[in-house]
Image (tube, rainbow, N blue to C red):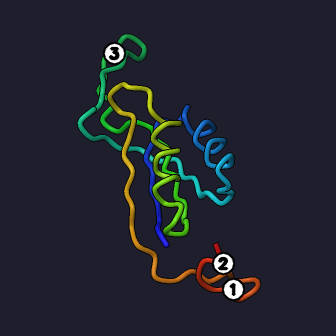
Amino acid sequence: MKLITAIIKPFKQEDVREALSEIGIAGVTVTEVKGFGRQKGHTELYRGAEYVVDFLPKVKMEIVVADDIADQAIETIINAANTGKIGDGKIFVSNIEQVIRIRTGEVGEEAI
């Protein structure tokens, strides 16, 4: 099993969720986060004063999937989140050793 963590632009969240639903992935955990990468921050004007915004708002989506659909899920996220502009985000893929559904006690891929 794989944990796919995608850091994307906030306005792309619904597009990614819908695209994942279309390929049969129903479970997604979403967190509003802030950060920066190569994009750095940007300067804004507020009440006549300039200030630097170092951390930009992003959305972190976490999805646990079976190994056999991980590549399809990653491609789906890339296609749905891509704007072609700086700051589109990143995807991290990690191995998951065990999943347990608390309510039923199911383990492994049945628990996803």
Rendered location of residue 35, percent (x, y): 35, 44
Q: Residues within 10 Å of mark 1 (few under 14, many from 20)?
A: few
Q: Is residue 33 above or below residue 50?
A: below
Circle nearer the N terminus (2, 1): 1
As helix, strand or loop, the secondary structure at mark 1 comes to loop
Residue at screen point 59% across, 58% down = 29
Viewer-side residue, 65 vs 87: 65
User: Residue 5, which numbered label?
Assistant: none
Q: Is residue 79 left or right of residue 18?
A: left
As helix, strand or loop, the secondary structure at mark 3 comes to strand
Q: Alpha-carbon distance for marks 1 and 3?
A: 56 Å
- Report which residue position mark 1 lands on: 106
The residue sitting at the top extreme is 48
The residue sitting at the right extreme is 104
Rendered location of residue 21, percent (x, y): 68, 49
Amino acid on which disc 3 is placed: Ala
User: Residue 111, which numbered label?
Assistant: 2
Residue at screen point 45% across, 50% down = 6
Circle nearer the N terminus (1, 3): 3
The residue sitting at the front extreme is 68
Contact? badges 2 and 1 (CB < 8 Å): yes
Amino acid on which disc 1 is placed: Glu
Q: Is residue 97 above or below residue 64?
A: below
Viewer-side residue, 46 vs 79: 79
- Report which residue position mark 3 lands on: 49
